[in-house]
Every structure is written in structure tokens, then in C-alpha cells.
Amino acid sequence: MTNLKWIWLYIKEQKFLYFTCILLLVIESIAEIYSVKMQQYIIDEVIIAGAYEKLWLYIPLIAVFYLLFSLLFVINPYIQSKIHGKIKSQLQEQALLHFYKIPFKKLQEKRDAKYVHYFSNEIPIVSRIIGEDIADIVKYAFNTLLLCGLIIYSAPLILIAILIFSIIYIQIGRKFNMKQKCAWKEIQHQKAEFLVTLEEGITSTRDIIATNSHDWESKRFSKKYNRYFQSLMQEGKLKIQQVYSMESLTLSAQLFVLGYGGFLVLNETMTIGVLVVIFQLTSTLLQSFIKLYNLIFAFSGKLVSVENIKQWLQTPVSNDGSNKLDKPIEEISFEDIYFRHNEDSDYILKNLSINIPIGKKVAIVGPSGSGKSTIASLLTKFNNAHTGKIKVNGYDLESISSEHWREKVAVVFQDSYLFPSSIKDNLLMGYKMGNDELQNYCEAMLIQGMISELPNKFESLIGERGVTISGGQKQRLSLVRALLRNPEILILDESTSALDVHTEKEIQNNIDKIRQGKTTIIIAHRLSTIRNADVIFVINNGKVCEQGTHVELIKMGSIYADLVNKELEDDRKKVL
């Protein structure tokens, strides 16, 4: 799809308001031009002819044109801003929804600041192009044609001269056009790179201070900023050259009209009134040419933003199903699952087959890199298997609506995101629950004591990414966030790794009580906390190599037993 066709898709959704705006802009141009045109009749037919009784005819006409122009001069920007705002809101909503549907693998190919750049810079530019710039181009194109018609009627040679000046103007402009487009693209690129560095610097503040790397970070920041600044300066130089060239042409055209028009007046082939009006309209025509050219000139540069947003919104999204489960989850099975992150990498999961027992506590353990967390990402539909199927109540998981599925499944990661808001907002995230019930969950996760000590309790702010609290406290808040939703399936992906052994064990016991009769899947960090699991799956090299209870697996004396013995040995070394 071309950029213009893509733009049209947004225009036609509010075409009545859009074309009404264009019509009013055209009427505004007519009113402005004819308010000047009326001066010709006042000079020639009233002042020079001495027919002062006609003054009362032309003054009301001029007043009407000025009043109409002034009224539309105020109304039109309001309508354009309204269209601009609607399109901006539509694009942002569409972009946000699309953002959540992009496959995680594809999403992680770009830095966070790049997506921030799309929302904060590219989308406003695109919405302004669609909402205002195109209508302004139509307005000044009509303005130019109307002025040409009026001038050619009174002085064809003057119009020819202006057209020659305009052609020269356009030729000079074309020289800058490609340079400006490249400069604009470079500015957007360098700005995005600078924002990435800025975001990294802010996020890593604590590490920069801790490692005393201020000079290194300052040089890195300055390098990116200087590149961005140089790109801005390059565009500025182009604009200065453009202004110098265009202003020289405008002055030359005005001098020609004044000289040639004066000659015609002396030879009595043109009236003074016509000369005064043509001189003003010549300046207006040149300005109209300039504005029209600048709009088209800027439009060509801004199409880079249109292309960027269009390509982003056309990024392939994850295939989402439409099925909904009519009854509680009764069966989950992995059937011959193969998964890898890209075509060039090795398979992380190979021929994986698991039947998850419903209503039980299930643990998944294995060496680092064995594919434990990948199983969780597949089960939460963050990634899709390359081959094989995950069946839920007989349905292929990919055929089930993601929104519906995530109402039944909750996951707690090792490092969940916390918003720079209150504790309560972070826990509920739009979910409705009374403070007493919320407090019970916090007590079960051993975090209520910390909350009670804060001045504002649940309303206390925790800072950017929860910077004011410890890693263990973050994990406990994340556990509360998931538990209070009472999901049918709860996945804990090393969600207690920052806790000490005793706290972790107590929390796990409380989770067991809360989740009695419900399915809890634990990606184990410390094996001592999952000894009471109903079934333990041992993953190695992407396959299930062992499964059973803790006692059964110890008796096998294989991989699981080795992992347990290694953990016990590490604990003894820490004690010593």
C-alpha cells in the first residue's frame, strides 16, 4: 500500500468534517483576496473619479469580506485541530493495541526508546500531516490559482514574470528538497539513537554511580547528543540557504511589478487602483507560492514518518484465536513441541511432551538454559511453538483468544515491572478489591509489615520501577498482584529468587494454602521449596528426561538427584 492510500484510510473515516474544513478554507481564501480587490474600486471609482456617494457601497462589502475572513481565520484552525486530535488519538490507540500484539521476539529487536520515539514524535507528525497539512496544501493551491486568474485578467505580462520567478523558485527548491529529506531522516535517526542513550543513562543511574563511571557515561551521552545536534545544524544551514534564495526572488518580483506597473500607469494603460491591488496581490501570490512550496517541501520530508509508522503498524502480529473456553480448565498437554528463537539457532525445546495435572502443584526444574522458562512463555502465549501443539480442553492453545486465556492464567516473573505509582495501584492494576482482602494477601506474602510502616500505607509511592524498595519486596508485591486475581493457572517463573531461604519457604507454604485445589506451576530456583510438589518435571536439553515426586526422583539417582546434591553442597559451602 502506498503512503497516500494509507493516509486516505484515515481521512475517509471523518470525511464529512474533513471536506467541510477544506471548503471553509477555500471560502477564507476568497474572502481574504476580495477584501484586497475591493480597494481597486475605492481608489479608481470613488477617490479618483470623485464619486464619493459610492463609498457607502464598497465599505460594507469590504467589511463583510474582512468579517468573514476574520471569522474563518479563527474557526478553521479549531476544526483542523479537532481533526488532528482525532487522528492522533486514533493512531495512538491503534499503535498501542498493535504493540501488544507484536510477537515478543519481534518486539525485542528494537530498544524501548525507539517505541517511545514512535509515540512521542512520529505519530504527532503523521497526525499533523493528515489533520492539517493536506488541507493547507489544498487551500494554498486554490489561493494560487485564484490569484493567477485575477492578475492575468489585469496584467498578463506581470503574471508571466511572476510565473518565471516561480519556476526559478521551484528549481532552486528542488535542489534543497532531497537534501532536506535526507537531513530530516538523519535527524529522526539521530534523535532516536539519542533517546535510547538517554533512557539507558536514566535507567542505569544506580549502576553508574556504584561503578564511578560518570566520565564514561558523560562521554557516551555527549557523543550521541553531538551527532543529534550536528544533524539539526545541518538542517538549519539548509533552511538559511533556502530563505536567502527565496527572499531574493520575492524582492526581485516586487521591484519588477512596481517598475512595470508604474510604466503602464504613466502610459494610462493601467489605473492606479489596479496597480495598488496587483502589487499587493503579487506579494500575496508569491507568499502563496512560498507557503505551498514549503508545505509540499515539508510534506515530502514528513513522509519518512508516515513510512515509519505505516511499516510499524503493518508489522506482522501474533496469530490470535477466537475460541473461548466455556468451562474451567480440565486438561493441558504439550504434544511434540519444538521451539527456537530464530531459524539460525538451535532448538531450545525438542520433541517436548508433558501432561500438566490440573489442580496440582507442578514443578519444572533443570539446569540453566534447559528450556524451563520457555515452557512458561509458551503457556502464556508470549511465544508460539514452531511445531507441535499445546492442547487445552482439547483446543489448540493458539486457537484460543489471548485476552480470554490471560483471564485464566497469571504469571509472576523473576523481575516483574512496577510502575512509579502507589503500592495499591501496582497491586490492583484496575482490579477491584477491598483493603481488608488486599491486606490478607499481603500478610500471606509477608509484605504487609513493610506496607504498615510506610506513612501512607497502600497509597505510598514506590518510585520508578520500585526503586525505593528491595528486590525481595518487589517480588512479594508481584506475587500479591497475581494471587489476588485467583487465576485457574498460576505460573511462578523463579519469582522468589531474591528471597532468603526461610522467607521463601514460608511464602511457598502460604501459596500452597491459598492455591489448594488449583493449578500452580513453579519454575524452581531453589529445589528445597518444591519438595512437596505433586509432580516434578526435570527438563534437560529441551526434553523431559525425568518426572515424579521428590522422593521418586531422588531414588532414581539421576539428574534431579544430582541437582539436589549440588544445591546441598553449595549451601554447606556458604555456611562454612
Image (cartoon, rainbow, N blue to C red):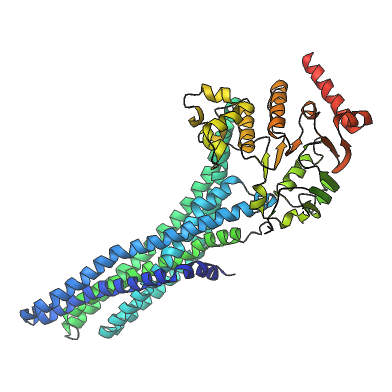
At horizontal 55% and vertical 36% (from top left) the residue drawn is 426
* Residue 475 image point, x, y percent: 64, 31
* Residue 188 image point, x, y percent: 53, 53
Q: Quadrant of the N terminus?
A: bottom right
| The residue positioned farthest toward the top in the image shown | 576
Residue 28 in view of the camera: yes
Name the one closer to the observer, 328 or 348: 328
Q: Is residue 562 above or below residue 338?
A: above
At horizontal 86% and vertical 33% (from top left) the residue drawn is 549
Q: Quadrant of residue 164?
A: bottom left
Numbered circles on residues, count: 0
Name the one closer to the observer, 351 or 8: 351
Q: Quadrant of the C terminus?
A: top right
* Residue 103 image point, x, y percent: 68, 53
* Residue 312 image point, x, y percent: 60, 58
Name the one closer to the observer, 354 or 440: 440
Q: Is residue 90 left or right of residue 54?
A: right
Residue 201 in view of the camera: no
